[in-house]
């Protein structure tokens, strides 16, 4: 590969990388500069006043080439002022003995047009582990964790770090992904996404990005070796390995993994599932990252570059406009529109609408639907749930089609994969006695309505402020109602109301118990459950005993128990007992099948015998479980 081609590609790539940084800074004007400029500085500085200080570290870490980053050096005075450092000299000091960080890279939606206020930022911190001894690698881990703790408290964007060995990346060894990827390797899929979406925050340039010649094939390994061994060779490249193709079984494994994530985060994952299904159906199609690299490097305008997420959206829409039913294609367009958080036809048009608008001129959405989608955050809860049900049905359709494609081409499907996914689906869909059913809300962090509890004809109901005719939940047990809204992620203590009624329940006790339920169980998230759990028999993992919540008596007589319990398959149940005998029979079964049970207790704070009652409850239940 000619040196002049390499240098031209490098120049073009650096201009594209700056374009991506500008998108991140535009999308996140407060958080972006911290990620782009301060993060490399934090990793390179080791002072007590600076987040990430490691007392035992003899030489500070050195992020490759940070000393030549004029923008970081220009901003360093403001960094020092923030942390109360008066030293006038630069704190970026390193020696030949300083352990080197090869590069800092993003992966995913950060710095693309698909980045929204819900997006997180995944960052790879890449090193050659052979350059580190056990202690310095441990110190780097500790430093990263300290920095993350500070970022969590300062930024709105959730930032996640992945300390990665360059040799492992080259071999596509991305940690223990095989099992958590539901049994099927998906390693090259991850590398494809990395090359297509990454931003180089600071450090060495991925050699893959510049190893390209539009006129003839290029031998990657030979070109890298030739550059590395040449006296005139460029030293600021990193060898993360070539990527020639992706095995179809990897696409299938990645599809199962995305389906797993979609059970909790449907809008975020359905786009990737559609993309993976496209490659399963068209195995000879050139990789998106290859097409995208060519588009970037062959461009002539140094001020205009394609966006990777928009490029992928265009490819998926192009494909499905010819390969799916018209009604499904209309859904797909709307999914993309919501995923990108677009606001076409609105008074304020951002860079996102200006750049992505051409796609929706090509694949038009009806004007009335655009206005409706623009108001998605303000939809009634019931409207969001209805849309979520359609989305969920479409996800299952895609999943079944993916399995059909895999089987139809006689490709191997690990039996445990189908067992795991089947049980995860069961966790989401199967109706069981006492089980808390799920709402399929299409997006996390949706604007939550005011929820009002009322008690009519001995029945509790919860209504939303935006639709008083439609109850969110109806049940004779208020603990079940409260558990339902917490488990489905629509509980906000500031948005809870109650109409006057004759029960002893107060609004403050509803809020307190809701917080306790959320503290113990969280909200439904089957994608976070360890895959191995679904290959084990069902057991109860956590249990919350709620004592006499609706009881108006103020004595110590305990006869009203509600038990909220979660199994190892992320299913939540609520049962009510009116006597200790019935409770004892239930716990007898529990103790046999669930030896490692985590227990919690809740008693109304306005019970005048609170301390004595809770102690007595613990004693009774402990004796029951032990017996």
Image (tube, rainbow, N blue to C red):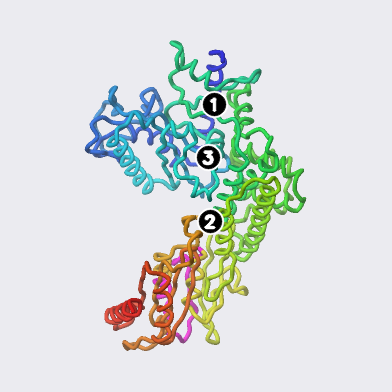
Which residue carries the number 1 mark? 209
Which residue corresponds to the image point at 60% horizontal and 44% vertical from the top-left? 348
Relative vertical location of residue 321 with respect to residue 384 in this rendering, above or below: above
For the residues labelled 3 and 1, the Cα–Cα distance comes to 19 Å
Which residue carries the number 2 mark? 444
Relative vertical location of residue 148 with respect to residue 609 in this rendering, above or below: above
Q: Which of marks 2 and 3 is in front?
A: 3
Stretch of the chain drawn in magenta: 489-513
Task: Name the element at disc 1.
Answer: helix
Which residue corresponds to the image point at 36% horizontal and 49% vertical from the top-left? 153
Q: Quadrant of the C terminus?
A: bottom left
Q: Nearer the viewer, mark 3 or mark 1?
A: 3
Find residue 560 and report its image quarter: bottom left
249 sits to left or right of 485: right
Task: Name the element at disc 2.
Answer: loop
Between discs 3 and 1, the one toward the N terminus: 3
For the residues labelled 2 and 3, the Cα–Cα distance comes to 27 Å
153 sits to left or right of 371: left
Which residue carries the number 3 mark? 187
Residue 4, how many percent across, how many down? 55, 13
Residue 296, how many percent across, how many down? 60, 27
Q: Residue 221 carries which label?
A: none
Asked if one can make out residue 228 in the rendered structure from this viewpoint, the answer is yes
On whether residue 78 falls in the magenta region, the answer is no
Q: Nearer the viewer, mark 1 or mark 2?
A: 1
Relative vertical location of residue 210 with respect to residue 112 in this rendering, above or below: above
Residue 295, how many percent across, how many down? 63, 28
């Amino acid at each position: 590969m000619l040196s002049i081609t390499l240098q031209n590609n490098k120049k073009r790539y650096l201009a594209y990388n700056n374009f991506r940084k500008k998108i991140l800074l535009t999308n996140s004007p407060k958080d972006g500069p911290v990620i782009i400029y301060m993060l490399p500085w934090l990793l390179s500085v080791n002072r007590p006043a600076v987040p990430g200080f490691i007392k035992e570290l003899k030489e500070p870490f050195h992020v490759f080439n940070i000393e030549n980053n004029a923008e970081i050096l220009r901003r360093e005075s403001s960094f020092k002022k923030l942390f109360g450092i008066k030293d006038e000299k630069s704190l970026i000091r390193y020696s030949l003995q300083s352990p080197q960080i090869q590069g800092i890279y993003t992966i995913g939606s950060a710095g693309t047009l698909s980045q929204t206020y819900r997006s997180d930022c995944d960052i790879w911190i890449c090193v050659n582990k052979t350059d580190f001894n056990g202690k310095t690698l441990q110190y780097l881990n500790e430093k990263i964790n300290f920095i993350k703790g500070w970022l969590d408290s300062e930024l709105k964007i959730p930032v996640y770090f992945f300390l990665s060995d360059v040799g492992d990346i080259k071999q596509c060894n991305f940690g223990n992904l095989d099992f958590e990827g539901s049994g099927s390797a998906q390693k090259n899929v991850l590398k494809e996404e990395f090359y297509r979406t990454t931003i180089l925050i600071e450090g060495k340039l991925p050699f893959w990005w510049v190893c390209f010649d539009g006129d003839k094939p290029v031998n990657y390994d030979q070109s890298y070796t030739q550059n590395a061994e040449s006296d005139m060779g460029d030293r600021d490249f990193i060898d993360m390995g070539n990527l020639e193709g992706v095995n179809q079984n990897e696409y299938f494994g990645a599809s199962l993994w995305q389906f797993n994530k979609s059970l909790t985060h449907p809008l975020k994952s359905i786009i990737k599932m559609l993309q993976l299904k496209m490659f399963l159906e068209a195995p000879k199609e050139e990789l998106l990252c290859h097409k995208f690299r060519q588009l970037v490097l062959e461009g002539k305008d140094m001020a205009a570059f394609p966006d990777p997420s928009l490029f992928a959206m265009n490819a998926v829409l192009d494909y499905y406009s010819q390969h799916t039913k018209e009604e499904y294609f209309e859904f797909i367009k709307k999914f993309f529109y919501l995923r990108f958080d677009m606001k076409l036809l609105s008074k304020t048009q951002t860079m996102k609408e200006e750049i992505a608008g051409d796609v929706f001129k090509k694949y038009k959405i009806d004007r009335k639907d655009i206005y409706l989608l623009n108001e998605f955050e303000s939809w009634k809860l019931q409207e969001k749930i209805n849309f979520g049900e359609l989305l969920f049905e479409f996800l299952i359709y895609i999943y079944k089609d993916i399995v059909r494609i895999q089987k139809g081409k006689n490709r191997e499907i690990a039996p445990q994969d189908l067992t795991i996914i089947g049980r995860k689906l069961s966790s989401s869909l199967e109706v069981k006695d006492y089980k808390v059913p799920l709402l399929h809300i299409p997006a996390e962090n949706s604007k939550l309505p005011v929820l009002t509890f009322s008690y009519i004809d001995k029945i509790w109901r919860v209504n939303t402020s935006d639709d008083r005719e439609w109850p969110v939940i109806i049940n004779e047990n208020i603990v079940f109602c409260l558990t339902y809204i917490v488990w489905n992620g629509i509980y906000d203590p500031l948005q809870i109301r109650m109409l006057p009624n004759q029960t002893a329940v107060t609004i403050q006790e509803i809020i307190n118990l809701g917080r306790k339920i959320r503290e113990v169980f969280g909200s439904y998230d089957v994608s976070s459950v360890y895959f191995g759990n679904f290959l084990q028999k069902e057991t109860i993992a956590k249990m919350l005993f709620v004592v006499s919540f609706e009881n108006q008596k103020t004595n110590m007589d305990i006869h009203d128990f509600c038990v909220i319990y979660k199994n190892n398959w992320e299913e939540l149940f609520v049962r009510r007992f009116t006597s200790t005998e019935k409770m004892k029979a239930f716990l007898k079964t529990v103790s046999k099948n669930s030896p490692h049970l985590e227990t919690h207790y809740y008693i109304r704070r306005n019970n005048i015998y609170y301390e004595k009652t809770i102690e007595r409850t613990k004693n009774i239940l402990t004796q029951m479980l032990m017996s």
